[in-house]
Amino acid sequence: MPKHSGTSLALTVREHDAALGGLIRANPLAILVVDAHDRVQMVNPAFEVLFGFRESELIGHPIDAFIVPKDRTAEAAGLSQRGFSGHTARSVTQRRRKDGTLVDIDLTVVPLATGANAVGAYGIFRDLTEQKRAERHLRAQYAVIEALANSATIEGAATWVLRSVAEALQWQCGVMWIVDKTANELRCVDCWSSPEIDAQQFESETRQRRFARGVGPGRTWEIGRPNWISDVTTEPAFSRHTGAVSAGLHAAFSLPMVLDNEIVGVLEFFTRSILDSDEQILRMFEALGRQLGDFVGRTRAQEQLERFFTMSGDLLSIAGFDGYFTRVNESWHRTLGYTTTEIMSHPVLELVHPDDRDSTSTMLAGLMRGIPVAQFENRLRCKDGSYRWLSWTATPKPDEQLVYAVAHDATARKLLEHQTQETLKMRNDFVSFVTHQLRTPLSGIKWMLELASDTEDAAEKASYVGDARESANRLIGLVNDLLDASRLESGKLQVTLEPVDLRALTDAVLADVATLVREKGHALDVESEPNLPPALLDHQLMRQVVLNLVSNAIKYTPQDGRIKITMGLAGGALRWSIKDSGIGISRDAQKRLFEKFFRAENAYTVDTEGTGLGLYLVRLIVERLGGAIACESEEGRGTLFYFTLPLAAGEGT
Amino acid sequence: MTEAKSILLAEDDRFLRRACETKLKQAGFDVRVAVDGEEALTLARAQAPDLLLLDLLMPRRDGLSVLAELRGDPATKGIPVVIMSNSSKDLERQKASTLGVVDYWIKSNLSLQELCDRVSQLLQHQK
């Protein structure tokens, strides 16, 4: 194999290139020409730019010594050898620049032949830096997307995001800051550093820090744009100086995390090199800032929904088409008493009141056919066995096989509705009853007067008028009783309390009814303890009580009966009782005796004109005066009524 | 003149009973009176009247129960009945109408003369 001197070959190559119109010199690819001993014969300007060597530095020297990294010498020798033996060879590899940094290249070695003899080789270098960088950035993007997809919170995604980005950039440290709206400052979410550096001090300095708007990473928060520092160790405004120096960090850039137009956080990255602002990096990661901002927004919206779900007073739930709840909020526990697990481990229908199961099944079947429920009410069993009314709104999602349901506790409303209905019914009953009771004496008056005016007979006329008057009196008595009852019920009746001698009051009443007693031939006894102390009472009302009870005893005791009134002290109170040998009161009737308008069935046989207000008023008055009334009776044998009243102050035993 | 039409008056209020009885007798009707539901039933069974004027709220047996008993017995089933009550409850009206009554009168809204005229009119139409 003929040997050419370097110089002559170099000359030959140059002449050759010139003849081809500067194909090598003007080529944008970096091109190197070596002789068969790997000595540099020529490099083009693109080579000078890529590797940082002047052609004059290299001419005549073996190229390996300049651009081949130590761990790639064998590979480089192999490539040259193939060129020298007349073959074209290619490799995607790395070479070293003059400044020591590595550069990714696509290297093609082409034989340089004169005649049939290979006298050297061309090395053609394509710079892969951009391509590699783009690949790394793409990988970083994927890694970030993956991290966000697998995290519920930005905190959970932070480490992966920082690491992915830093590794893609081949930078060594990353920090994530979140805007704390309450404190109006940046708070460190996470700090990641490569194992290649000792960033312990920098990390701990960073994690403890809070930055106000406009300070440190807060500058990026303020301006809303990425920010670049070529060397933090020479930047006077950089406050984590000591840590950065000890970790060997120099260049830094930060970018805002943007949600709509709001900055929700800031990312910071650091590297060991001193680097000027790299527009390409900044542009590349602008999208990342928006991506992270959106994620924060999404998780924030999620948290807000979660908060509503938890705090809602309504019973929120998601149920499967299989009839089991898959999710329920806290209100279920608060309302029904079950734990969340207990609720979810039973089919919904099991909790439904047996009477509501059919309607609930129908409603559920509708939901499964995709029909939403706007208004449905049923009762659900609580843990304590009681039932609560729930008012439902539900929307089915057949594609998810799920039902989203909101239930409102309607128990109170249902109770109120029921009470209102009862009250209305009672009012209607009352009005009907009172109407009837008023119409009867009114008819009596009207008809008796009609008869009186139709007759010329004076005695007959007088008799009709007498009956009309009696009917009128009954009407007045009824109206007065109704008014008294209404006033006592509402507590509006004026009560004048004064010391009352109950014995004297009773005697006065008995004097008024003496004729009646005589007519029926009753034997009437009154017995009282001597020197009975006075009670603090309303005289008028008390008289009404005694008169009512005495009248009843006279009325409901058949001819020639026995009536006995007893007065005395019992347990520090006055006790007044009246016992008769009358028709008595059935056990059932005794229970309702003091109710408004109640009349015992056997009372009708004696007197059909009663209003059912007498004993009701007696009870209201006695209770109003601070006492109590009761009754003991056996049907056909007689009745005992007794009431107790508090003594006047200072009269106690 | 044919035989006087017979009326059974069931009314527990003594004033109303007296007034009605007097007026109807003055008009020439044959009037029997019952003071409660049981008596009304007994008297109606003993001899079916041409017209029963029946109060509703009465002791021992109320008017509706009397009406139901009468309607359940072939012997008394056909007795024409007019309810005379001071109650305006729809439910009672409905029940009475279901059991079959000629009319339903509110006593306080009628004068004795009107009452008498109505009774005459009803009985005239009876063949």
Image: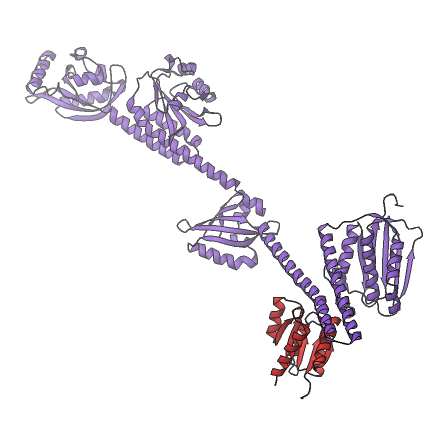
Chain colours: A purple, B red
> Where is residue A100 shown, x and y percent of the image?
27, 15
For residue B91, above or below residue B122? above
For residue A232, above or below residue A348? above
The reply to whether residue A524 is visible in this rendering is: yes
> Where is residue A386 shown, x and y percent of the image?
61, 52
For residue A323, above or below residue A15? below
For residue B32, above or below residue A417? below
Q: Looking at the image, which residue is at 57% across and 56% down? A: A353
What residue occupies the far front of the structure in this picture?
A: A456
Q: Nearer the viewer, residue A46 or A466?
A: A466
Residue A31: name its quadrant: top left
Task: Give the left or right position of residue A174, taking residue A33 as reference.
Answer: right
Q: Looking at the image, which residue is at 14% across and 26% down? A: A88
Q: Nearer the viewer, residue A568 or A427?
A: A427
What residue occupies the far bottom of the structure in this picture?
A: B1
What residue occupies the far right of the structure in this picture?
A: A530
Residue A515: name its quadrant: bottom right
Q: Looking at the image, which residue is at 71% across and 54% down? A: A486
> Where is residue B10 shown, x and y percent of the image?
71, 75
Which image quadrant: the N terminus of chain A? top left
The reply to whether residue B12 is visible in this rendering is: no
> Where is residue A61 shown, x and y percent of the image?
18, 12
Q: Nearer the viewer, residue A57 or A289?
A: A289
Q: Nearer the viewer, residue A241 or A186?
A: A186
Instruction: Report the number of numbered marks.
Output: 0
Residue B43: name its quadrant: bottom right
